[in-house]
Image: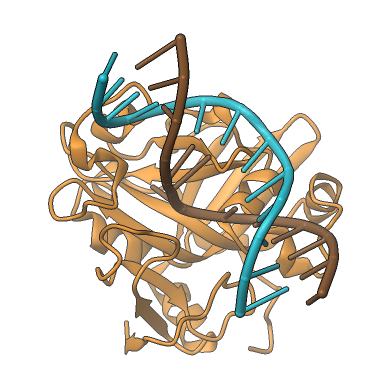
Chain colours: A orange, B brown, C cyan
Amino acid sequence: MTDFYKIDLSRFHKPDRAFFKRDVVKVAKDLLCGYIKHATRHGIVGGLIVEDEAYSMYDDPGAHSFRGVTERNKVMFGPPGHAYMYFTYGNHWMFNIVAEKEGIGAAVLVRALQPVEGIAYMWERRPKAKKECDLTSGPGKLAAALNLGKNEYGVDLMDGEFSVLLPEPEYRKKLIREYGGVTVTTRIGLTQGAELPYRFYLTEHPCVSVRKKIQKTADK
DNA sequence: GAGACGATTTTCT
DNA sequence: GAAAATCGTCTCG
């Protein structure tokens, strides 16, 4: 907990696409402590993933992909490692990372980040935030803070201006230990599939959006 | 083409 | 803790 805001970016590397081409629930769990980076016109913004959720077409009526391909969700069925962006509640963009092999509609919703790079820019994007974690402690918030929207729909996250990086295994273990382990809960804001334990977060991390009552810890 | 609703955020009580 | 804001997408007729 001591070196809370000192994320060592030298210990992150570009992922293998095979990382995303796996069971989406595992991908979601393994993406904790991943790093999202976006090179905007005004500089680089980036943050550490501290909370996410899995969505799958197989057993999950809460997933957009559950009822088949539509114009909105088609990216979920495409190759893994790409960005699925969608707009909801009239205001908010959500950022998802496509998982599983091509043809399977599955993705991981990134729900909260710890701000690391470009924090001044995030404050400009989200002037209503009160503390640093408010910049990115929610799916709509982090999309606004990193300036993500329809332009990022379908973008390949393996490389380029908008990408995801993974920590070295030893460094990841250290981060998880510092933040009190990983908590598994049901997902937020769903009416269907609400009972599925597909949400993951760093237990003691202050940037987590919502803490639920039903919790069971999973060490990793 | 109309109507309902949502993987949310903010503000007010 | 509750409710409004707000509009693209999906479903049905």
The correct choice, above or below, for A147 with respect to A135 in the image is above
Q: List x then y, in percent, for residue A149.
A: 59, 33
Q: From the viewer's perspective, is A71 left or right of A94? A: left
The reply to whether residue A23 is in sight is yes
The N terminus of chain A sits in image quarter: bottom right
Question: Residue at (19%, 37%) from the top-left corner?
Answer: A67
Q: Is residue A126 left or right of residue A173?
A: right
x and y, in percent, of residue A7 in the image: 64, 69
Which residue occupies the foreground of this view, A178 or A87? A87
Quadrant of the snapshot with the C terminus of chain A: bottom left
Q: Quadrant of residue B4?
A: top left
In the displayed structure, does residue A100 sit left or right of residue C3? Answer: left
Q: Hey, which quadrant is residue A41 in on the image?
A: top right
Looking at the rendered structure, the number of numbered marks drawn on it comes to 0
Q: Quadrant of residue A192?
A: bottom left
Q: Is residue A131 above or below residue C6?
A: below
Pick the residue in front: A42 or A25.
Answer: A25
Quick one: A218 or A184, which is closer to the camera?
A184
Residue A158, visible in the rendered structure: no
x 54%, y 30%: residue? A152
Residue A45: horizontal and vertical position, in percent?
70, 47
The residue that appears at 53% across and 56% down in the rendered structure is: A35
